[in-house]
Amino acid sequence: MNRAGVRRREPLLGRILSSRWTKVVLFAACLVPILLLAWPLFILVTSGYSPELTANPIEYITHYTGTWTIRFLLIALSITPLRKIFNQPKLARYRRMLGLFAFFYVCLHFLIWFVLDKFFSFPDMWADILKRPYITVGMAGFAMLIPLAVTSTAGWVRRIGFMKWQRLHRLAYFAALAGVIHYYWLVKSDVRLPLMYAGILGVLMLYRLATRKPAPHRSAAARAASGKSPATTPNTASLPD
Amino acid sequence: MFIRKSADLRYSDVTPKQMYVNRRSFLTGSLALGALAGAARGMKLNDFKKTSYNVGDEKITPLDAITHYNNFYEFGTDKSDPSENAQNFRTNPWTLQVEGEVAKPLTFDHDQLFKIAPLEERIYRHRCVEAWSIVVPWIGFPLNALLKQAQPTAKAKYVAFESYYDPRQMPKARWSGIQFPYVEGLRLDEAMHPLTLLAVGLYGESLPNQDGAPIRLVVPWKYGFKSAKSLVKIRLVTKQPPTTWNLAAPNEYGFYSNVNPHVDHPRWSQAKERRLGEIFRRDTLMFNGYSEVASLYNGMDLRRNF
């Protein structure tokens, strides 16, 4: 009840975003890509061939998990723009789950490659990382997501402080970029899909650039006149937006 | 839903629309043979002899895989695109022309393709530049049988191949990143080598559309993109002809493109390959296991002439 004693209902969208059931539904939705593989995988294992998984199921599943990694990363990176544009701060509650699912899919993507391509061989893996640029950049993206997954909890935000945490989690932008370059560098000639993901990432980054709060500007003359050196003038440029 | 009622029904089993719509005239036999060319199943080939061209104890790749995992960018760049989109590809009527530096230019229509020379079955390895491979029981005849009929002149040094291109039947071609019509080429001695095959069928039937119907090149010791599909022109020329993938990326796809585990693609290794149906990669063989062609390249630096 507000002060006038009149009951005001929260808008539907706000109620949905506050409900704990939304997290359950979202969790289930994030599992759908892997669940869609379950039945074809069963057919593959029992009968030797599943048309959905193509005649090269290892390549198909590697590609599938990689695509979903990029998609979940981009969805997670769109939370902040969406919450600002639609003025729905509660959207931020779901960003962690989306980011962790991106990490889940990238782990699958890496494991398939490490087990079925490199056959658990670390030397072979390192050789590829050093020699194949698309693998170098892919591994860099994977490596960047590890600290983000580890520090994804509220406990870690408290432990390292919000400012440092937020700066660390900007690695997500670079991980997404690494993923897009990785994809672009492995296609033979049809670059449409990598470019599409690059375009989406570009739009998300441009939005962040455009809505950054500008640093307070004092001219050099004004600073000199006030007798303060640049080192003692507070630097507010790095405050989070 | 992934629980299918009939596990082996696929899009390719669907009756082609032309046949369904005209089923009455199909039943009375008045529908032209050409309409059936779009059907997924080819026509049975009866008169071919078996040969000793085989791959030891390596398993022949199942027909399902050979016909549903294809690179045929005219019909789209996904591996499943050609089998979906080439259903209505008209391969009859067809014209194959043999021209250029020959004493006897030749032209063949669809039915004549199967009578150019006695048909034989050859089981070859087929290695894609993407580092996967299959084993295919092709049916065809050696290219040199056709070339001998055309009688190349003394000036002929190379053979150029051109594939069919029709933007109306191949609307997805323009998004693939390569130019069409698809062109390829061989040195004359590579073209005359007994291994080089013109294939009109596989697995006892005529070629499925997605595998390059009605006639295609098969050069088993080179990466698969050299084996041009759906040929319409074979031209004897004096200079090394342009080849589509070399035009698209000259530092990645060379004119020779011999299978070579020691010369990597700039972006990925060629040392191992995924044989479809197997779980772990196998070592790639020099010349895809066809060491009999090594003499064609004596003295050539195969790293520079990749």
Image (cartoon, coloured by chain):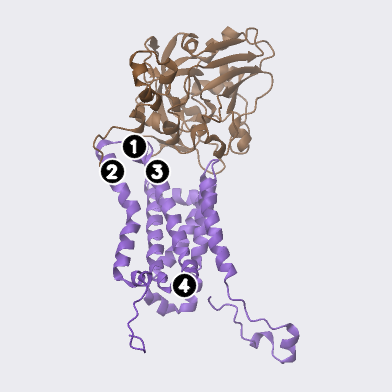
Q: Provide the residue designation for mark 3.
A: A60
Q: Provide the residue designation for mark 4.
A: A87
Q: What chain does mark 1 sit on?
A: A
Q: Report crowding for label 2: few under 14, some 14 to 19, many 20 or more residues within 10 A (C-alpha).
A: few
Q: Which of the marked residues, 4 or 1, is nearer the chain's N terminus?
A: 1
| Circles 4 and 1 on the same chain | yes
Instruction: Give the CA separation, mark 1 to mark 2.
Output: 11 Å
Which quadrant is the C terminus of chain B positioned in? top right
Task: Specify the label residue B52 is tagged with.
Answer: none
Q: Report crowding for label 4: few under 14, some 14 to 19, many 20 or more residues within 10 A (C-alpha).
A: few
| Circles 2 and 4 on the same chain | no
Instruction: Tell me where residue A190 appears, x and y as whole percent.
Output: 54, 42
Instruction: Tell me where residue B269 appears, x and y as whole percent.
Output: 50, 41
Q: Provide the residue designation for mark 2.
A: B2
Q: Secondary structure at mark 2?
A: loop
Q: Provide the residue designation for mark 1.
A: A51
